[in-house]
Amino acid sequence: MTQFGPPPYEPPISNVEYGYAPTLERKPWSTAAISAFVLSILGCLGITALLGLVLGVVGIVRTSGGKRRGMGLAIAAIPISLITGVLSLCVLAGFISYQKMTSITIKLSEALKAGSSDFGQAASELHSQGSEDFRAAVSEKQLEDWFSAVREKHGTLVEITGAEGDQAGTPDIKPSGGFPIPFVIKGKFVNGPASVRVVLLWQGWNVMTIDDLEVDGLSPRQSKNDVAKPD
C-alpha cells in the first residue's frame, strides 16, 4: 500500500523577491505640530497666533530625530503665526483708530449742532483730545471763539450729508511725531452746505489726536481776532 507523506516544506515568498520593501512601523503624528499649524492658520484671531508660535517650537522639539511625524507642519507654523499675528494687530489698530475717529466726529458734529451756551464745554472736551502741537497753538478760549465764528457764518449744523478722504492729500499743517490723517465731513448748515475738514494725528496703534479743524477754511489755529471776525 502506497503511503503519502507530508508535502516538502517550502519557505514563504519574500516581499523582496517581488520588489517590495519590508513594511516599517510608522511613527505617530505629533499633536503639538498639528495643533501649531491649525492655530497659525487661525492667527488672525490674535491669541491663536501666539499659541501657534509656541506650539510650533514645541512641535519641532518633539519631532526632531524622527521620534514623531509632523516636523514640516511645526516649521511652517512659525512663519505663518508671525504673519497672521502681525495682520491681526493691524486689524485691531485699524478698528481702534476707526472708533476714535468716529468718536471725535460725533463730538464735533454735536458741538456744531449745540447752542452757544454749550460751546465752552465742547471746546474743553475737544481741546483735551488735541495733539501737543494743537493744544500749544490753540487755547480752549480760541476753540470756543471758533465755534462762535462758525455759527455766525454758517449757522447751526443740521445734518452730516457725507464724509470722505481729503482730496487735497497732505494737510497744510505738517505735524511732527505722528502720521496725519485728513478727511472731510460734508455738512448741511442753516445757511447752506459747508465742508468740515478734520486732521487727525495717528501717533500709535491706539493713540489718535486732533491736529486741526476747519470749516470752509476757517480754523481755530488762526489768531483770535481772525477767528472772532470771519469774512
Image (cartoon, grey):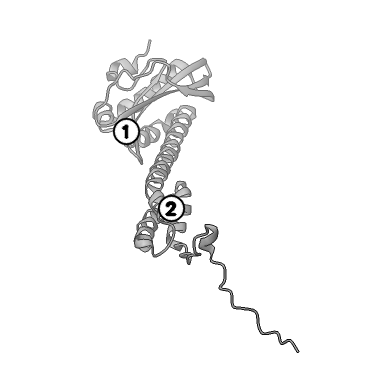
Q: Which residue is mark 1?
A: 130
Left or right for 188, reference 147: right
Residue 47 seen by the camera: no
Quadrant for residue 138, please give it: top left
How many C-alpha atoms fall within 10 Å of the one at disc 2: few (<14), some, or many (≥20)? Answer: many
Q: Residue at x 35, y 60 (%)?
A: 64
Disc 2 on helix, strand or loop? Answer: helix
Identity of the residue furthest to the right in this view: 1
Question: Is residue 209 or residue 111 the one in the foreground?
Answer: 209
Quadrant for residue 100, please give it: top left
Left or right for 87, reference 179: right
Residue 40 seen by the camera: yes
Mark 1 vs 2, N-terminal side: 2
Q: Residue 145 at what x, y percent from top left?
A: 35, 24
Q: Residue 50 at what x, y percent from top left?
A: 38, 53
Disc 1 on helix, strand or loop? Answer: loop
- Give the vertical position of 52 relative to 211 (above or below): below
Question: Is residue 92 or residue 181 the one in the foreground?
Answer: 92
Q: Which residue is mark 2?
A: 73
Image quadrant containing the N terminus: bottom right
Q: Residue 61 at what x, y percent from top left?
A: 34, 61
Q: Residue at x 38, y 18 (%)?
A: 169
